[in-house]
Structures are given as C-alpha cells and as structure tokens.
Amino acid sequence: MSVLIIVFLTAVIALFSGVFEQGKFARYIGILGLIIALYVSFMPECSFFDHYKHMYEYSANTALFTKISIVTTLLLFFLGGFAFSNHRSHQSELYALMLFALCGGIVLFGYQNLVTMFLGVEILSIPLYVMAGANKTDLRSNEASIKYFLMGAFATGFLLFGIAFIYGSAGSFDLYKIHDFGVANAGNVMFILGVLLILCALAFKVALAPFHMWSPDVYAGSPSLITAFMASVVKISGFFALFRLMTIGFAGVTHEWINVLGVFLIITLLLANVMGLAQTNAKRMLAYSSVSHAGYIGLVFFGMTSLSTYNLAFYLFAYALSTVGVFMCLIWVEKLKRETSFGAFKGLAKTEPLLATAATISMLSMAGVPLTAGFMGKFALFSQAMNGAAFLVLVAVLGSALSIAYYLRLIIAMFFFKESTFKSSEKVTLTYNIIAVVVIAAIIILGIFPDLFARVFGL
C-alpha cells in the first residue's frame, strides 16, 4: 500500500503543478514519483498496513505486477514531452489522470474482496473516459470518449449485478469465503449467474470478443500516448484482476465458466486477426492487434500450473514493451503527417532507422518470432495450455500466423520504399532514441535470456 500512496500523492502534486507554467513540470514530477514508487516496490511492505489485509494485500504477486505497470508507465511518461506537445494548456491534468488510473491498477493487483475490486475497476476506468477525449477539437476523440463511457457504464452494470448475485448467494464479498461457498455449492444457480456476469464485465475491460466493440474506435480516436497506456497498463491491470478473481474466488466452479471463456477466446483470436488484415490505418490495426493479444493471454487459464502467474507476468511485460516500441514510432509519424495510415510510414527507415527498427522488432515480438520476448511469452502460455486445451492452442497458432501479415505491411512501408516521405530536417528527439534502444535491447535480451526477467524484478 506504500506504493499506492506514493503514486496517489504524485498524481495530486502533478495535478496542482498546472498552476505554474501551464503544468510543464508535471511530467518531471510524475517521472520522479514513479521512480520513487518503483524503488519502494522492491522493499518489504510496512507492517502498519497489515490492518487492511482483509481489503488489500501487498503480496509477492501484487509487487510483481505493480513493478511491471510502473516501469511501463515510466516509459510512457518519457514519451510524453513530445506526444503531449499540443496539450500544453492541460498537460498536468493528463499526467495526473494517467497516475490516478495507475492507482486503480495497483488496487486491482492486491484486492481481497469484491468491493475493493469494484473500486479498483472504477478508479482505473473513469480517468480513461476523460483522457480518451483529450483532443477536444477532434470529433474522433470526442466519439472515443463518449463511446468508452457509455460502454464502460454498461459493463459496470454487469459487474454490479454479478457482485449482487455473488453476495446474495455466498453472503460475503471476501474472495476466500466466496471460494469456499463455490466448492460447497457448485450447483447454485444464482452464484453461477453472478460468476458469468462478472466474467462478461471483466471481458469488456480487457477487450475480449464479443465485448471488444468499443476498442477499435476508442483506440483510434484517443491521443496516441493514451492509446498506448490503454493497450499496456490497462490490459495488465484488467487481466491480473480477472486472473486473481477466477483462480481464487471462482476456482470452486471452474467447470462452469472455463468453457464460456474458451468460446470468448476462439471468437477473439479469429475475429481480431481477420479484422486486423482488413485495416488500412496503423492505429486501428494495432487496436485489433491488442484484441488478439487478449486472446493469447487468456490461454493462461487453461492447464494451469504453479508457474501460471509468472507466465502471465512475463507475457504482459513483453507485450507492454512491444506496445511502447510501436506507439513511440506511431506518435512521431502522427505528429509530422497528421495521419496514421500505412502510407504515412513510407520510407521512415531511411530518415529514422533506429525508430523504425524499434517498431519492427516490437511487431515481430508481438507476432511471436523467435529470439524476441514475445516468442518466449507465447511459448510459455501455449505449452501450458496444451495440457488442457490443445484446440485453443491450434487456433492461437493460426491467429499468430495471420497477425504476421498485417505487421509485415507496416514493416514493408517503413523499409522497402526507395524514396522517403520524411524531411531530413525532421529529426526525432534524443529521448525517443534512448527509449528505442532500451526497448530493442529489452525485447531481444528477454527473448534470449528469459530468466533475467525474474532476476530484474526480484523474484
């Protein structure tokens, strides 16, 4: 809980820094606060917070996913100076909202009961509704905000109904008491209905089909840095919340929800990758890519072992790194060209080879090409799922093969055009070059030496 408090206070200070110099210090305040929070996350939790263990517990798994989220948010903050250059009048609000959303994610990493989970989901979601509409003069951004809000409210209704059914049958919000009730009353209709309603609500949060309808429009309309935050930090938070709930609270009725989840994954893997092939806009393509990765990550629920949590963490971190690498390139191109079509990337490698290389390696990692972190993440999840759902793994492999096609379209646009459409005077900033090197190195090193992940994050 110490980390949660530090991130919250950083958000408050960043918000009020907007009073001075139009909030240009907010990014630096956020970076400093996140570095402090990351340092504290490696330290033992203060015994004072033991009083709140029935609501929130900072366990080893909580610490691991908190570290991953903070590192990802930190990388995005470094990209913010250029990405938010046209938001100078309200930069402090955007950085503060990102930190408040991160607070919601941290709550979801350690919740012990359904009330705390609901608070975490809402603290995570409400800032996103605002950030999606940050481009006030852009109709697509306005559409993204209202669509995300309306669909989010719909999902919240599902979540609350589900919680009500669970409490009505089990008589408790506590995950472990709910687990015990499920084991003893596996055939309780009200309880099972509550489980399925909550599963649908959280499927919306992580963009599993058929609850993904909002994501392409919201991802395309939101500011690109916010889209990157949604595709990385929000997905990390949402998936671990779902994983924690299903493997602790609802583990006693696994046979009642596992097949439903399997159907969601099949629809997700096939639909998202086929729709990704049909896109002509890089940002919408990445939106469907994000939906497809929700399908791959969902395989963690099948054939579970003692390493399932670790496999989930590794995959989410590898995917988050790749997301930062691709969106870093997209942000720069969008600023110069005012568009994100595949054509806008033509010849980028001739002007900015490091940026194009970072995006390429990131997409190859997303596709699961060997010697990348994404390959090791997929290999771990696919190997685990083979023990319980071989057919799903086959569908996932087919989806991965399809995904290579739409990633290659962007790679070809960047590297295989003789003439560059970018002016040599338009050079990327030093910060972006440094982050590009960090992302390239991290993806390749984790692809070759995956055990380093455990060492770096103190496991």
Image: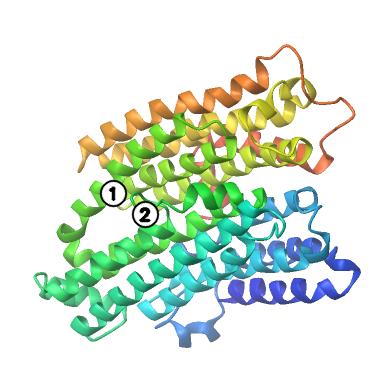
Q: Is residue 75 left or right of residue 380?
A: right
Q: Is residue 179 above or below residue 324?
A: below
Question: Which disc, if any, is residue 97?
Answer: none
The x, y position of residue 215, in whole percent, is 48, 51
- Dividing the picture into quarters, in which one does residue 102 lie? bottom right
Q: Is residue 105 left or right of residue 303?
A: right
Q: Nearer the viewer, residue 339 or 26?
A: 339
Q: Residue 63: in sight, yes or no? A: no
Q: Is residue 322 above or below residue 49?
A: above
Question: Which disc, if any, is residue 211?
Answer: 2
The x, y position of residue 273, in whole percent, is 40, 34
Residue ID at (39%, 66%): 155
- Dividing the picture into quarters, in which one does residue 73 lie? bottom right
Q: Residue 201: in sight, yes or no? A: yes
Q: CA distance from mark 2 to mark 1?
A: 9 Å
Q: Helix, strand or loop at disc 1? A: helix
Residue ID at (77%, 22%): 421
The x, y position of residue 417, in whole percent, is 69, 14
- Dividing the picture into quarters, in which one does residue 332 lie? top right
In the picture of the structure, the residue carrying the numbered disc 1 is 264
